[in-house]
Amino acid sequence: MRAALFLPLAFLLAACGAAPRVEFADASITLPDDPGDLPEGPGRDSVIENCTACHSPSTMLQQPKISREKWEATVKKMVTLYKAPVDEKAVPQIVDYLLAAQAGEGDVSRETPR
């Protein structure tokens, strides 16, 4: 009985052979330039103090155009769902800045991706 169990297992192991050879190649990627700073504008300091711990300038400035209500809901989601340490008093300035960035108002500008 033992031989009956041993022989199929031995054949199975013999059929496996050696493990396949795996080679790793070096790879590199080039990341796009990320502006080091946010453009000047009202509310910029609030955005820097509350948002840049998690978001890069390009992440914030390349968002789709949305309404004030949706920006407010987005900031609220960052606080409630992701536990972002956002000062509640800064939310209006953050939203104003992001809306101005979307509209290209004043010194706050945004390049349109091509």
Image: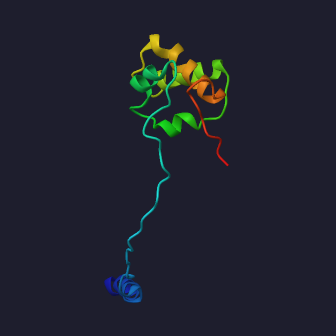
Left-right relation of 45 to 73: left
Q: Is residue 83 visible?
A: no
Q: Quadrant of the N terminus?
A: bottom left
**Residue sitting at x 45%, y 62%:** 29
Q: Position of residue 70 (x, y in %)?
A: 64, 22
Which of 73 and 19 lies nearest the eye of the viewer? 73
The colour scheme applied to this rendered structure is rainbow
Left-right relation of 48 to 60: left
Query: How many numbered marks have been drawn onto this rendered protein structure?
Result: 0
> Residue placed farthest to the top in the image?
89
Would you identify the image quadrant in which residue 4 lies? bottom left
Q: Position of residue 23 (x, y in %)?
A: 37, 78
> Residue placed farthest to the front in the image?
107
Which of 104 and 72 lies nearest the eye of the viewer? 104
Q: Position of residue 55 (x, y in %)?
A: 45, 35
In the image, residue 41 above or below residue 58: above
> Residue placed farthest to the left in the image?
2
**Residue sitting at x 37%, y 89%:** 14
Which of 77 and 26 lies nearest the eye of the viewer? 26
In the image, residue 37 above or below residue 11: above
Q: Is residue 104 visible?
A: yes
Q: Position of residue 95 (x, y in %)?
A: 56, 20
